[in-house]
Amino acid sequence: MPRFYCPAPLIPEALLELPAGAARHVQVLRLQPGTSITLFNQGPDWEGPASDGEFDATITQMGRSTVQVRVGAQHPVERAAPRQVHLALGMPANERMDWLVEKAVELGVASIQPLMTERSVLRLNGERADKKVAHWQSVAIAASEQCGGNRVPRVFPVTTLARWLPNWRLALPADTQPWLLSLLNNPGGTTPWQPAADPILFLSGPEGGCSAEEEAAAVQAGFQPLSLGVRVLRAETAALAALARLVCG
């Protein structure tokens, strides 16, 4: 059954006009009145009280650019990872960031913070940065709809590592445990793979990794170095490898 993120109140038996994004998706799929779909509303675009799980819904009317549905029964299913895992990373270039966002959402990431570092190839500022973040957020929505997730992770605005490090705790739960993915420090050392309830934040560098100065600044900000082994991983692979290891075991 097609699934759609619908940042709006979901009340059984209510008639609801889908927001523009979901309505456009329904139109693209060429769905018709009478088609059954699934809705969920937990995500960064919805500031009202979020509903647990997902809802049945039936398309009742199709306009040129509008779609009306009748909301059905609520199903309190939960498919989130056992604990929150956040990713902060030096943005890889080209389409690799799109791929990273999509796969991280499929694995169950809680949020993604794109960063510019000394060695970052991709440089974004102003309107271009805003458009990229909006695009990555749409990738996260589509991935959540596809994989069965009921919580769309937030993609935070692009910033520099230097600006982000002193303030990273402001955006995350107070008990978040910070780890620095690195091949330069602590090879084979202590790892956070043991089961625990505390949220985890992974900080990973771009192509070429973080500089020695950036790694030192991260450690000073509370991050603990962590190695994934002796192989040199691509920027997008390292973050996903850590996420998969923690979420999937």
Image (cartoon, rainbow, N blue to C red):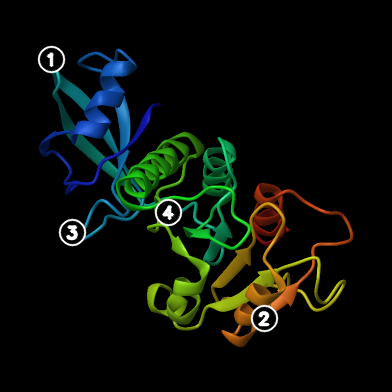
Q: In whole angstroms, how far apart are the C-alphas of marks 3 and 1?
A: 28 Å
Which one is in front, 44 or 248? 44
- Number of the front mark, 3 or 1: 1
Q: Quadrant of residue 156?
A: bottom left
Residue at x 87%, y 72% (from the top left corner): 188
For the residues bearing labels 2 and 1, Cβ distance under 8 angstroms: no
Dot placed on the residue nearer the N-terminal end, 2 or 1: 1
Nearest-to-viewer mark from 3 and 2? 2
Q: Residues within 10 Å of mark 3 (few under 14, many from 20)?
A: few
CB atoms of marks 3 and 4 within 8 Å: no
Q: How far is disc 4 from disc 1 in space, using C-alphas?
A: 30 Å
Foreground of the two, 56 or 115: 115
How far is mark 3 from mark 4, CA to CA?
A: 16 Å
Residue placed under numbered mark 3 in the picture: 48
* In this view, 59 is above or below 178: above
Residue 85 placement, left or right of 3: right
Give coordinates of residue 109: x percent, y percent.
Answer: 53, 56
Q: Residues within 10 Å of mark 1 (few under 14, many from 20)?
A: few
Q: Amino acid at mark 4?
A: Pro
Report which residue position mark 4 lands on: 153
Tag 4–tag 1 contact (CB < 8 Å): no
Q: Label 4 crowding class (10 Å Cα cut-off): few <14, some 14-19, many 20+?
A: many
Give the tally of numbered discs.
4
